[in-house]
Amino acid sequence: MGQRRTEVLQAAIGLLDEVGLDALTMRLLASRLGVRASALYRHYPSKQALLDAMVAHLVSVADDVAPLADAPWDELLRGVASGVRDIMLAHRDGARLISGFQHPGDEAVSTFERLIAALVAAGIPADVAAVAVDTVLAYANGYTIEEQNRKTGADGWPREHRDRAFQAGLDLIVSGVRGTLVQ
């Protein structure tokens, strides 16, 4: 990725944190960068392309937080779900941003496929493994959207309580997946 393109991406993420997803416009971003909006379209052909690049960047950061290693399948699912949630919570409207992607990027697709492969290697049927990974990621995203929309951290629910509740829901999903293991 070119240096200027990276600068635009980083500025967009900073602006997301400052003003939120609804107020993030190409015009405002261009103003912050001291250029005309048309200059941004050299780097990203549309606002959706920029949003998709932001998602791909955040997902790649989440991969760094919860790398896929030789951990048991259930730990991998929990680690990826928690890592993605942490990244979404680190950015204003992060969960809404991620839920709105059209093209997740090669890294996100690769992570998804590696998780499925890890579950299949552990004895989970391939069709169930795909549904399980999709369900865990959708759960992480949906839970985080609720957190961010309700601003639960500001209404008296401490982060530790929200973390425990998130993990409890994740445990329910993992238990269901565990029941499909082929012996």
Image (tube, rainbow, N blue to C red):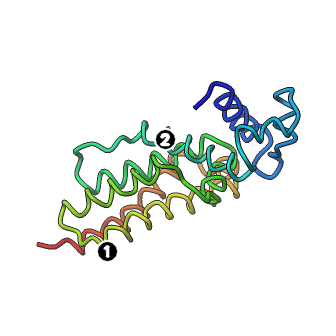
Looking at the rendered image, the quarter that the N terminus falls into is top right
Q: From the viewer's perspective, is 120 left or right of 145?
A: left
Q: From the viewer's perspective, is 38 left or right of 76?
A: right
Report the disc number at residue 162: none
Q: Residue at x 44, y 53 (%)?
A: 81
User: Which residue type carries mark 1?
Assistant: Asp
Where in the figure is residue 179, as x and y percent of width and height? 24, 74
Earlier-in-chain disc, 1 versus 2? 2
State the residue position of label 1.
127
Where in the figure is residue 141, as x and y percent of width and height? 55, 58
Taking depth in this image into account, of 132 and 39 the one nearest to the observer is 39
Where in the figure is residue 54, as x and y percent of width and height? 63, 43
Q: Residue at x 40, y 56 (%)?
A: 112
Q: Residue at x 80, y 45 (%)?
A: 24
CA neighbours of label 2 inside 10 A, class few (<14), some (14 to 19), many (20+): many
Taking depth in this image into account, of 60 and 66 the one nearest to the observer is 60
Residue 33 location, quadrant: top right
State the residue position of label 2.
60
Taking depth in this image into account, of 174 and 22 the one nearest to the observer is 22
Residue lying at the far front of the rendered structure: 42
Where in the figure is residue 172, as x and y percent of width and height? 37, 68
- Distance Cα–Cα, label 1 vs label 2: 25 Å
Q: From the viewer's perspective, is 117 left or right of 45?
A: left
